[in-house]
Every structure is written in structure tokens, then in C-alpha cells.
Amino acid sequence: MSDLEKETILISALNQFMFCPRRCALMHVEGIWSDNAHTAQGTLLHERADRAGYEADGAAKLLRALPLHSVRYGLTGRADIVEVRDGGRVVAPVEYKKGKRRHFENDDVQLCAQGLCLEEMFQTAAVPRGFIFHAGSKRRREVVFDESLRTRTVEAIEATRALLLSGRVPAARLLPRCEGCSLRGVCLPELTDHTQAVAETAARELWEGASDGS
């Protein structure tokens, strides 16, 4: 598949996929969305950051709500802020997140994907890093776009695209991360995970019984 033939996916879908493929499919295949306290706080935070515009902050130019795209990777989205320095030779995406300063791989992958788009858009050799601003602690965390993270990001792009193109919603698994998920009431991981476990047990017992000749 050539670059121009790639199915375009949202950068935000990568974050959802890394957090939970089922959540990603429910949102981007089934079109299901539900708010809770966590998502409402995130929405309010991004309403402040998503006011498109330009401003100067010392030696940096700040581009707010900059639309992003990549033909090579088939991505589209928007950066909360892009810092531009040295006449455009140095650019860095800044993503706003609620809560205190913590490390989440899904956030790092989302930010790295923004960096890949900026490399293509600004025609620069490499965007070396980006930053995640944590509103709860009012601190930001540097994310280095090293080869390991770039590889995980490209793999996530292809896996997310494959999931969305399949049109299938993965089975639920009850995990600690389900706590606080806004789609828990729709996903019903307790019920689905239990039902799947019962079916797998029944199938295993049937197979073992057939193997024993009983």
C-alpha cells in the first residue's frame, strides 16, 4: 500500500488503542462515546489549550491547536501546542493532560506520533523530543523520541489501522485500568469477561472429554 493509499487515522485513536483496543474500537468503529468526571475534566482542560492562535514566549513561538497530518504514516490530528525555535529548525509538540505528573506509554506514543507529523510538515530531519504538561501538578515531562519509542509508535499506528479496518470490536477483559473508564457501562467487562471465561472452560472440558474418549 502506498502512502497516499493508506487509511487515515486520528492520532488520538493511537492513545485509545494503547490504553485498550476494545475502547478504541467502541469509539472509532461503533461511534460510542460517554463522559465521566475524568473525560469532563480533560475536555475543560483542552478547551483552554485548543484556542487556535500564535504567541511568543521568550525565544519560542507557540502555535496553539495546530492541525497535524502525515501522508507517510496516514495520520491526522491536532497538537495542543507546538513550540518553534531557531527559525523553525527546532520544533516540539506539547500535549496537555489532566492529573499529576505520571508516565503513561499511551501518552508517549500519541506525542511521538505528533512528532512524526511535524517532521513531515516542517521538512525537518528529526523532532527529537516533546513535552506533556500535567495540569494537576502544573509540571511538564520531557519525552525523548528515541528509536525504541519511534518503533513502538509505528507499530501502534499499523495495529490501530488494522483494528479499525477490520471493523471488529475485541472481546472485553476486566483489568485494573477499567476503573474510571468512561465506557465501562457500555463495555461491561465484568459480564463479557466472565461469559468468555465460561465459554472457554466449557470448550476446554468438551475437548478434553473427547480426547479421553468419554
Image (cartoon, rainbow, N blue to C red):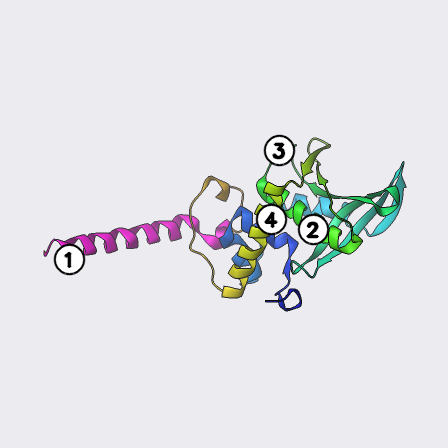
- Mark 2 surroundings: few (<14), some (14-19) or many (≥20) residues within 10 A: many
Residue, disc 1: 210
- Quarter of the rendering containing residue 4: bottom right
Q: Is residue 166 left or right of residue 92?
A: left
Of residues 101 and 45, the one drawn nearer to the viewer in this rendering: 101
Say if mark 2 contacts mark 1, CB within 8 Å: no
Residue, disc 3: 102
Residue, disc 2: 116
Q: Amino acid at mark 1?
A: Ala
Q: What is the span of residues highlighted in magenta in the rendered image?
A: 184-213
210 inside magenta stretch: yes
Answer with mark 2 or mark 1, whichever residue precedes in sequence. Answer: 2
Residue 37 visible? The answer is: no
- The mark closer to the camera, 2 or 3, is 2
Residue, disc 4: 153
Q: Amino acid at mark 2?
A: Leu
